[in-house]
Amino acid sequence: MSRGSLRPLAVTAVVVASSTFALRSPVPEPVTLSACATPRQINDGFSVAAPSTAGIDDAKLCGLIKQAAAANLNLHSIVVERGGAIIAEQYLPGVDWSIWSLRGYAQNFGPDEQHDMRSVSKSVVGLLVGIAIAQGKMKGVDTPVFDNYPGLAEFATPPKRAIKLHHVLNMSTGLAWHETAATYGTFANDETRLFLDWRIPRVVLKRELFAAPGELYNYNGGNTALLADLLEQQTGETLANFARKHLFEPLGIQQWTWVRDPWRRNISFAGLRLRPRDMLKIGRVLRERGAWQGKQIIPADWIERSMRAYAKTANGLGYGYQWYSGVVVNQGANVSWYGAMGNGGQRLFVVPDLELTIAMTAGGYNSSSIGRAQMGLFREIVASVK
């Protein structure tokens, strides 16, 4: 499915639906694993193998996954790939809150279930922008953003005219914006206005500057919404159609949804739904510098730009073109990783030097504990690679 199936909602319903972001899922019952993360062989471009054949101790990886499942954090899936083969794949029952759900619901997750990506959607939008620029359908990263919006000239002060597409991509526009996990779904969070107002460019660009463009990182879902608006404006295609033709179909990703807002726009900053194995496939493409099965899907130089740390986040991670980066320890040495992160525990980790990719989904929305636990699990897996 390539488009969200929801009909337009009345604006009065939006706050109710969005407010589910602020509610924590009921804690699921502890899970006992009957088997240890044995991957399925399906025709999706991945082979499967035992961890030991990929340089990871079977018992060690099994123990780490069992420990994560027993932690009762509402983890829904973990899929590990190394060197082109999936070596571990575990799905766990849990409680979820999809983006328009009015309440939590129990779900038996498996390889065929799509899962909310939340802000992993932003990272995918970053890749789509790179594809569109390479095709000559979008203006380059040095283009001043206000050049695309002559109707918003009243907000284009001389300092704000310095905002370029480059700054929008790496969250350093300097525009005032408040967005924290604890306030999602409330009017204390500026993201809420992206659901309520059909004039997204105005919502974002009318904000006052609190820093010079390029000076400071400030997380801002409005930046991603602006990227999507520019992509649709300049390519003449919806975000979902462009993604389908130029990213998902070339990768063989067939089961996906890009949920829409009350104005029937694809929710660029949080609305993508993917299966974990397809999430993993996007990570594999990054690791191969934009190539999949011998075909260049995303320009290699865009992958390099996307992973470059132009800014530092509050927790010390690097931030590029809608992608995070950092270092992790393997065999006593630091190795670089890149990744995408979404509210609730949606995680994609890519470690090129180790040929390792890890995808995780979860239902720990608006909680920081799931993210800390997943980062710890990621570090432990990396440390176990020989």
Image (cartoon, helix red, strand yellow):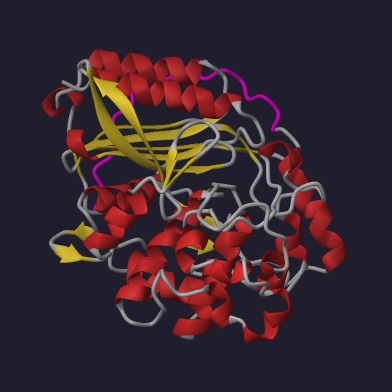
Q: Quadrant of residue 262?
A: bottom right
**Which of 132/65 is in front?**
132
Question: Residue 177: x and y, percent?
Answer: 69, 52
User: Can residue 206 be spotted in the picture?
Assistant: yes
Q: Look at 27% across and 54% down and name the residue there.
A: 304
The answer to if 30 sits in the magenta stretch is yes
Q: How many marks?
A: 0
Range drawn in magenta: 25-43
Q: Look at 28% across and 21% down and name the residue there.
A: 329
**Which of 216/294 is in front?**
216
| In the image, residue 185 above or below residue 78 | below
Asked whether, in this view, residue 136 is left or right of residue 167, the answer is: left
Question: Residue 101: x and y, percent?
Answer: 71, 50
Question: Residue 243: x and y, percent?
Answer: 42, 69
Asked whether, in this view, residue 280 is left or right of residue 82, the answer is: right
**Which of 134/139 is in front?**
139
Q: Look at 58% across and 61% down and name the residue there.
A: 223
| In the image, residue 87 above or below residue 177 | above
Q: Quadrant of residue 25?
A: top right
User: Most prominent secondary structure in the magenta stretch?
Assistant: loop
The answer to if 75 sits in the magenta stretch is no
Question: Residue 353: x and y, percent?
Answer: 18, 36
User: Can residue 1 be spotted in the picture?
Assistant: no
